[in-house]
Amino acid sequence: MSTPIPEIVLSAEDLAEAYCLHPLDHPGLLLVSTVFDGSGFGSWQHAMMIALSTKSKLYFIDGSLARPALTSPNLKKWTKCNNMVMS
């Protein structure tokens, strides 16, 4: 059984940063200098977590910024940023 992730309440400033995409952000952007090749996962993961944190996108992969409700005005922003992180 998995442990539920505690809900984190993000400030308006944190949300604004999380939903912001820089004009140079694109699906092919390399966030870390080493492409993961199946070895050295720990160091690659650490570098990726730092990179996502500096871009305020770590919330999308650690579960602390859940998908908004279908009626939320933030759904479109969340979807766009989540898709960019997944790409």
Image (cartoon, rainbow, N blue to C red):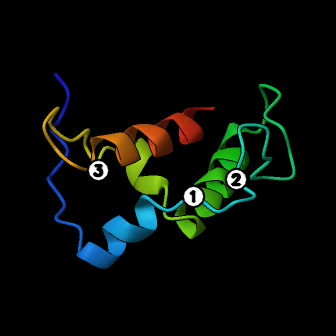
69, above or below 14, in the image: above
State the separation of the CA atoms marked 1 and 3. 16 Å
Which of pointers 1 and 3 lies earlier in the amino acid sequence?
1
Residue 58: x %, y % from top left: 47, 55
- The reply to whether dot 1 and dot 3 touch (C-beta < 8 Å) is no
Q: Quadrant of the image for the N terminus?
A: top left
Picture disc at residue 65: 3
Say what amino acid the circle numbered 2 marks: Asp
Mark 2, Cα crowd under 10 Å, few <14 / some 14-19 / many 20+, is some
Q: Is residue 5 left or right of residue 27?
A: left
Q: Nearer the viewer, residue 73 or 66?
A: 73
Residue 9: x %, y % from top left: 16, 65
8, above or below 86, in the image: below
Mark 2 — residue?
25
Mark 1 — residue?
21
Say what amino acid the circle numbered 1 marks: Leu
Q: Residue furthest top?
A: 1
Q: Is residue 6 left or right of residue 14?
A: left
Secondary structure at numbered mark 3: loop
Secondary structure at numbered mark 2: loop
Residue shown at the point (20%, 41%) measured from the top left: 68
